[in-house]
Amino acid sequence: MKKDDIFLPKILTFLCNWCSYAGADLAGTSRLQYPASILPVRVMCSSRVDPLLILRAFLNGFDGVLVTGCHLGDCHYQEGNYYTRRRFVMLKKVFDSLGLESDRLRLSWVSAAEGQKYAKVATEFTQKIRELGENSSKNKIFL
Amino acid sequence: MNKSAETSEKKGAVLPIKTSIQDSIKDLLKNGIDHCVFDAVMIPLRVPAGDSFSYVLIKNKSLLNDAFPLPPTMSVQGAKAVSSVTRLGNRNMKIAAVMRPCEIRATIELTKLDQTDLENIILISMDCPGTMPILDMVNEPEKTMTLFNDATKSWDDTQMRPVCQICDKSSMVAGDLHIGTLGTDKKSFFIIPNSTKGKDILEKLKLPLTDSIDSWNKKVKENSEKKLKKRQEVHSDLKNKIGDLTNLLDIFSQCINCHNCMRVCPICSCRLCYFDSNKVKHSSEEYLQRAKDKGSIRILPDTTLFHMGRMMHMSLSCVSCGSCEDACPMSIPVAQIFSMVADETQRLFDYVAGRCLEEPLPLRTYKEDELHEVEDVHG
């Protein structure tokens, strides 16, 4: 197979400023390899991510959306990620009840020390999206 | 009002029906004004043209004679009416608001969203046989009135809106007082208090509580079980019918982007909705970029984003009142789809919109140890 034939998904990734962004930074400075499918967006807290932003990314054709934040109990704002989790589970339920692919959405806790984990999450999620194939909303005009 | 109240057996007072149930309710309200239990009544009145109903705040009790405690259609969701009267606070006037159970539940949700002040409001609900489509009343007022009157006697819901036919909470007691008409001998009705406010009122009106409303409890349980079964069937059919993005788009493809469903929704109370904000106003460059990405782009864009976005923002508080479907000029089954999604999202948090004032909104609270299934299992 030629290199061009491999489907490289586009994955929008929200990184919290205090943990996950630093974790992603560590992955970079440690020269860890992970796919170039990730498009990072830094937010001050994972709870800043309105489910609507995730939905908008999904409907505009992103193949996957990854939300990352501090581990539970470690949130810079004490409890932000607990709210993130509640919103995320609600978002997934809305997707499921309408028969949309909620597997394209993922929530992960990555601390500032977990460069390794970040690279692993990025690799595995990319692999998972590859299995799912292209997001069908990419070709839909009447959205 | 507590969570367990939903299932526990109710106690209430038994009152005789003199001429009709609607007149007896009006007598009760007049009695309340006479005894200074409340200063005014918010209740639907038929408009002079005769083809619709509107909430009015009645101070002069003789005007109560023309009121309709239970009108055939719902032109304005009662929660919106309560909110517009009390949003800036209400310290001076005790108001009895007579509404359907779904309107009361929406009022409770709006209170959690700080859009009402219930301190001086007495919420009075009643057993609801359903609501007729709003346009039926406009097209054939007299026929609709007759059909509705028959339906209140027979509890036949075939003429009602589809979302009312699958309503299992049509007798849900969530306000201060509830008027029970199910399971009576047609010569009397029940009045059931559901809060200390409600109990005080019955005491002031010298209406003793009795235990003899078992027939109501039984009938309500029977009715809601039957409706719940139908609700689950309809929802599962709908879920199978949608099933994927293509079918979902097919359903919403008729949408003309009027946003009526949002305007009439009692829960959509944000001062600036995301969908009215500049975030959904794009530059021509953005349109072109999106057209380039996809090959072409529909204008106006973001119809699915609007509907699904609304599901994210309000489905946890959705009371399935059906106002959105009434308002849809394209007859999209909005309320049925929303009620299906709402049931599923609310079940996640063991939450029922409008069940009780003390239950916090699910997204405003959390438990430390919950929902681990959505967290990533990596490393």
Image (tube, rainbow, N blue to C red):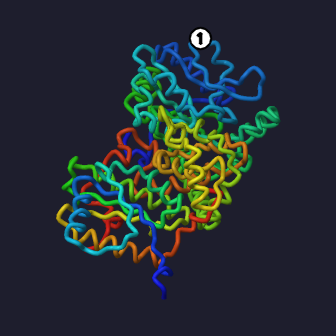
- Chain at numbered mark 1: B
Nearer the observer, B35 or A113: A113
Q: Residue sitting at 46 percent across and 51 percent down?
A: A52
Is residue B311 toward the left or the right of residue B188 in the image?
Answer: left
* Position of B129 relative to A92 (above/below): above
- Residue B16 in percent (x, y) is at 60, 29
Q: Give the quarter of the image for residue B56.
A: top right
- Residue B206 in percent (x, y) is at 45, 22
Q: Give the quarter of the image for residue A125.
A: bottom left
Q: What residue is disc 1 on?
A: B60
- Residue A102 in percent (x, y) is at 46, 66
Is residue B346 toward the left or the right of residue A141 in the image?
Answer: left
Q: Give the quarter of the image for residue B148.
A: top right
Examine the rendering and report whether any part of residue B210 can be seen.
no
Nearer the observer, B217 or B91: B91
Nearer the observer, A80 or A19: A19
Q: Residue sitting at 41 percent across and 76 percent down?
A: A128
Is residue B41 toward the left or the right of residue B48 in the image?
Answer: left
